[in-house]
Amino acid sequence: MKHITMKDIAKEAGVSLATVSYALNGNTGVSAAMRQKILQIAEEFQYVPHMSAQILARKTTPIVCGLVRSFSGVFSNELWDEMQDEFQKAGYLLVAVNRLLPELIGSDLFRGIVVLDFDITDQEQAIIDALHAPTVYLVGTHSPAKAQVMMDNQQAITLAYGELAKSVHQRLCILSGRETSINNYERLNTVKKLYSRDHPGTDVDSVVFSADFSYANAYDMSADLLARFDSFLCFNDVMAMAIYKGAFEKGLVVGRDLSISGFDNSILAFSASPGLTSVGFDGHQWAQEAVHQFKAAVRHGSDNIPATLISPTMNVRESIRYKEISEN
Amino acid sequence: MKHITMKDIAKEAGVSLATVSYALNGNTGVSAAMRQKILQIAEEFQYVPHMSAQILARKTTPIVCGLVRSFSGVFSNELWDEMQDEFQKAGYLLVAVNRLLPELIGSDLFRGIVVLDFDITDQEQAIIDALHAPTVYLVGTHSPAKAQVMMDNQQAITLAYGELAKSVHQRLCILSGRETSINNYERLNTVKKLYSRDHPGTDVDSVVFSADFSYANAYDMSADLLARFDSFLCFNDVMAMAIYKGAFEKGLVVGRDLSISGFDNSILAFSASPGLTSVGFDGHQWAQEAVHQFKAAVRHGSDNIPATLISPTMNVRESIRYKEISEN
DNA sequence: AGCCTGTGCACCGTGAAAGCG
DNA sequence: CCGCTTTCACGGTGCACAGGC
């Protein structure tokens, strides 16, 4: 089962390798008739270019490495699909990798990197930086001067906070995530300001609890928190589900006895009972911006590219019990 | 920012390219001292082999293409991690792609394919078959003679059925998935036999409903189904969550007024309230078998490799209300 | 001459076989 | 046989150039 090469096509067409190359690549220097003939033979032979040889000869590659470790949070199937589409439209091929293997990403196989995941460690950051390859971060990085497409955490958490403010439940608990996360930092910073504005004189830190974005941690804290609070601003959907569970076990009904808002608008949010009100981000827009940034990084390097912010959308479901509004 | 090549190392070490090649590849024909020197220089220069050139020269590649379209079902983050680990141990590098791009998979860049997803279309199947590349299916294929690592659907659905049989709720509804799915076929076939055995004279088909593995479909049917049944054998967790929602909206409590079992043991199952009893599969074992099959496919081709079955595990949570057992 | 069509060949980075003291 | 070098092949690219009208 031999692989078809340009040589086979050249022999069949009775021309040289160079002519075949020109014809297949759409370059000038071949007559329309000859190009047609060559393309037809290529089709007939089911010719597929040898990617490695192309990369070697062209000294560039269309393959983009997507670093994605977890699919359970905001990086959903939808975003994954959108990313593939958008990169493909731009002439790239996106593949996903789980781990930062230097032998892979340092090997000139990839045109660049899209970091589609949370919380790159310093060590991983160092590996990426050492590559000097076009890199786009979709999740926040400690290197602020890099190409980034961030969610607008400030706007998003303001939306969530505002939604809970309309609730009958006013004993607010803020369930935050991992301290090292940029997203967490931005959200926390914003919500602290909002809380301090609305509750002058009270200590914000007394209502902030960190569960590391983890279900298990949030669940462990849930019984205690539910005894003291009735309104929960969760920094991701997973932790919100843990509060659901704690409430369920106490016989409390979400959306009646307490209010919750989530973050990410993941599959958990709409499949929960009752549905979890959650802020999310438009995957299509995100993907488009990512490709846009990537192109810029390819042209000018990853440094000093202004970050793009993705606007959040509020997905209202039934997890918040609103005040009765006296409008007639 | 020039890429370091073997030539640079050769010049630095004062030897030929071939010597560098031998030293780096651990081949004989180099003195221990020279090898040491070369390795040290490579380290110092942070040399990373040019993967494309390696593939071209070696006429083989360590990269394996994982075809994965959705991460929401049984193919979880856990399995993705396990796969990476196991393939890496075996000397391969796994990357994930969510679309069957002929220009990628036909390009000799990949050593083979691992189909990690559900329901390959006939067209996609034809593309894969035409490649004659080592291929392992983790999800069931209509080509039965191919290397496969399947979940033991028969045993799994028997476990789920048996668990529901212990429930106080005996008006059983079987919520099945997509008709074209092999997994669905196997599960349905098995459960029909079990049901017919236990309910002689009744028509199995009157309790089987297909919701295509989809949340929306299952939700649309839920109100009707809940009026007629109180025990739900769901062929995936997503549909089970839709029944949760329908029950919630009717004021019914899962695990008290009705019983449900899921399938996949996904994040939905343990984060649901109450926890969803669900059969799952050990990701580690699955990954190990996949690599084992892949190696066999590399050696002997993908045809006529006996399929491996992965045993299910039953994860009991609180979604089933059991009969009181009079044991003292 | 000037334009068009097609060819020869050096090159990419690596690996393997053959050669040589 | 050891230790190293020379040479070629891998598949494709694209420049420089040749030949025809």
Image: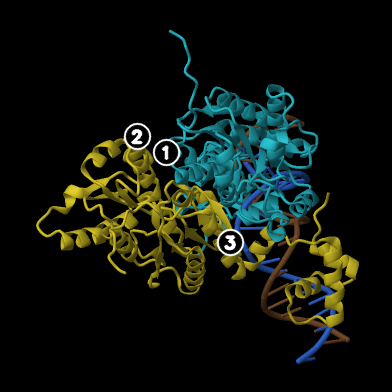
Chain colours: A cyan, B yellow, C brown, D blue
Question: Looking at the rendered structure, which numbered label has been put on residue B249?
Answer: 2
Q: Position of residue B20 (x, y in %)?
A: 80, 71
Residue at image location 67% in from the left, 54% down from the top: A109
Furthest toward the left, the residue is B201
Identify the residue position indicated by label 1 in the image. Answer: A273
Identify the residue position indicated by label 3 in the image. Answer: B84
State left or right for residue A293 relative to residue B98: right
Quadrant in the picture for residue B9: bottom right
Q: Position of residue A14 (x, y in %)?
A: 54, 52
Q: CA distance from mark 3 to mark 1?
A: 34 Å
Q: Secondary structure at mark 3?
A: helix
Q: Between B252 and B68, which is closer to the camera in this rendering?
A: B252
Q: Between B172 and B20, which is closer to the camera in this rendering?
A: B172
Q: Return the chain for callout 3.
A: B
For discs 3 and 1, the disc positioned in front in the rendered view:
1
For the residue carrying disc 2, how many other residues have a C-alpha within 10 Å: few (<14), some (14-19), or many (20+)?
few
Kind of residue sitting beneath label 2: Glu
Kind of residue sitting beneath label 1: Ser
**Can residue B60 be spotted in the picture?**
no
Q: Secondary structure at mark 1?
A: loop
For discs 2 and 3, the disc positioned in front in the rendered view:
2
Q: Earlier in the sequence, mark 2 or mark 3?
A: 3
Residue at image location 68% in from the left, 27% down from the top: A195
Q: CA distance from mark 1 to mark 2?
A: 8 Å
